[in-house]
Image: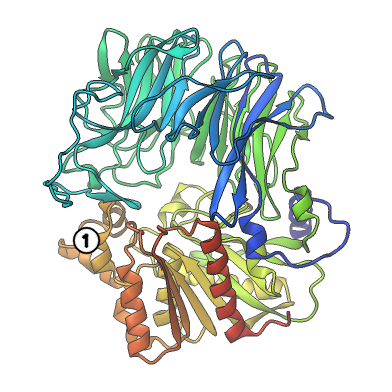
Amino acid sequence: MKKLLLAGLALLALAPATAAFARPITATDLATMRRIAAPAVSPDGNWAVYQLRETDLEGNRGRTDLWLVDLRSPEAQPTRLVTSPDVNESSPVFSTDGEWVYFLSGKSGSDQIWRIRRAHPAEQITDFPGGIGGFLLSPSGDRIAIWADRDIQCADLSCANVSAPGPGHGSGRAYDETFVRHWDTWATPGTRSRVFTFPLVDGRPQGAGTPVAPGLAGDSPSKPFGGAEELAWSADGRTLFFTLREGGSTEPNSTDLDIYAAREGAGVDNLTDANRAMDTTPAVSPDGRWLAYTAMARPTYEADRQVIQLRNLQTGQTRALTQEWDRSVGSIAWAPDGRSLYVTAGEVLDTPLFRVDVRTGRATRLTQGGTVGNVAPLANGAVLYTLNSLQAPDDLYLLDRRGRSRRLTSVNADKLADLDPVTVERFSFAGAHGDTVWGQIVKPAGAAGRLPTLLLIHGGPQSTFGNGWSYRWNPWVFAAPGYGAVTIDFHGSTGYGQAFTDAINRDWGGRPLEDLRLGLAAAGREEPQLDTANSCALGGSYGGFMANWIAGNWPDGFKCLVSHSGVFDQRAMAYETEELWFSEWEFGGPYFEPAAAANYERNNPVNFVQNFRTPMLVIHGERDFRIPYSQSLGLFNALQRRGIPSRLVVFPDENHWILKPQNSIQWYREVHGWLGRWLRPSN
């Protein structure tokens, strides 16, 4: 119990002070929280600029402005740097002399690069047809890399040499090899995310750009989520390092992202060709001697451990810096003195900031509870970062050289002050095979009486339901009507060593289900206020699969279930998903191989429909290409055919995630309505 109390105090330290209990948090509160992102630091370390999203609920969208904060003064208040009511400003970076802030804006009708200096109006510095996706300034200040979706035949970013299709060609898309769609977008044949480099004269790009890899067919940055973290300039600005997975017929079966070096006047080299697994996040040391990056070891396994590699850029010699540290590195930033790296990695429910010694590879934890992101080292040895927890969304913090942390922003203080807080308790128990498994209990502070219980099951499956804020599956919002929310990091979760993560392979319905059974019982013992006999289980993605699996393999465990974008039929999923490598790794090969097919079928919810009897809410986004919505249609038909109380909610404009503000509110309204129907909380 001492461990639980200490963990709870650490978590509460991140929560805002609340003068008095006001009211439970709602889905509208969640959707309208302000969201900090993309902080950047001036070269002298005196200023930070960041983007802040606010929600236009009536317009059903978020919009972002740029804010500036003086890092020298503990009393400094952030001020708006750029704001245009009808457009977004995003992705700010300082020029090398610190005089200008470059950023993206859609003010001209498409995303273009703008720049601004304090007390002056912003000015547009690019105007490329079709807009751009992003940019990266060189540390030398005389080069810029710009990326955008362009036809692979385009000679430059303007693409004047390629004509648009004329009328009468029809609307059909024709494909001769697979990977025809990805995440939520159909591929446009012949179009890729491509990088172009430009000289900068007086801070403005000159010419139409030079493609860095005209002979390579692939997306750089990678899709759907890659960005500037996948590119890096050399210290002299004459070499651009970029990440790319070659396209072609093998692309949907490959996780082989490689790091390439495009040297001015010397062509392109694949620096990581020997590794058939993923290599990404290149970062060049301040003195230009070293390239740090993360690498996985096993091809087609997207959740393998990411180990930091150090490559000597003169000799090409490479060593695995964190091979002996059994954690997967999520981000890399060099310390200004080049002697260490600041990294993030999952660690038992938290995602702290670590310092890794470049000589020894030793990792030292620098922060405690919560989830750290957006790490930006300062010239004076301090580190800027964002921090969130289960009890508060992101704010900016500054860690000084002595290890003292100072909060710089409180962007949601006014909103959080009006809300009843929650308490968070951690607990551990002996899970499957006697292994230690961790979980959390979230409940309204001051709640009285027995609480109906929600078992929240994370997706991935190689992920965590840890101490971090979510704008989608948020335990505070789930618990608000008067529930106790329980999360379990079952076998397959991250932050406990790679062997624990690997344990779910070919065993989706085995050890994780046992962990959930044992974990729910353990939560009830740790917190007697939880009424675990009056409970529902909810999950999305893999968690949705688990809700479907529970329906057939633990049919008497819950009064209701919620399945969001869950796998119902593994055989169909194996052929319908876009990233084929995922299912084929998880179950040992393609479905048409008999040994692999047996693994799929052993973990296939459709084989247990005859056992279904628990009422279920089924939700899906129609633009979900990761787990196509046909999975939920089949599930709903099975439930209806069996005469089981069930409801289907389909969002035609959403993908695997429900992101639009009004849709998020509707999602929670449907979920809370379903829970209230079967659990009847006291509130």
Is 76 drawn above or below residue 171 in the view shown?
above
Residue found at x 26% / y 53%: 580
Residue found at x 66% / y 29%: 384
Q: Regarding mark 1 in the picture, which secondary structure is present there?
A: helix
Is 475 drawn above or below residue 607 in the view shown?
above
Residue found at x 53% / y 13%: 286
The type of colouring in the image is: rainbow
Q: Residue furthest bottom?
A: 643
Residue 10 visible in the picture: yes
In the image, residue 604 lies at what x, y percent? 31, 72
Q: Quadrant of the C terminus?
A: bottom right
In depth, the one of 238 and 611 nearer the eye is 238
Tell whether 519 sits left or right of 259.
Answer: right
Residue 427 visible in the picture: no
Please name the amino acid that badge 1 sits on: Tyr
Asked where in the image residue 280 lies, by quadrant, the reply is top left
Residue found at x 42% / y 89%: 644
In depth, the one of 299 and 570 nearer the eye is 570
Is 123 drawn above or below residue 201 in the view shown?
below
Q: Which class describes the residues within 10 Å of circle 1: few (<14), some (14-19), or many (20+)?
A: some
Asked where in the image residue 542 lies, by quadrant, the reply is bottom left
In the image, residue 73 lies at what x, y percent? 81, 24
Q: How many marks?
A: 1
In the image, residue 213 lies at what x, y percent? 26, 22
Q: Residue furthest right?
A: 19
In the image, residue 518 lies at what x, y percent? 56, 72
Residue at mark 1 = 575
In depth, the one of 132 and 612 nearer the eye is 132
Tell whether 453 sits left or right of 128.
Answer: right
Tell whether 504 sits left or right of 422.
Answer: left
Q: Quadrant of the N terminus?
A: bottom right
Tell whether 682 sits left or right of 38.
Answer: right
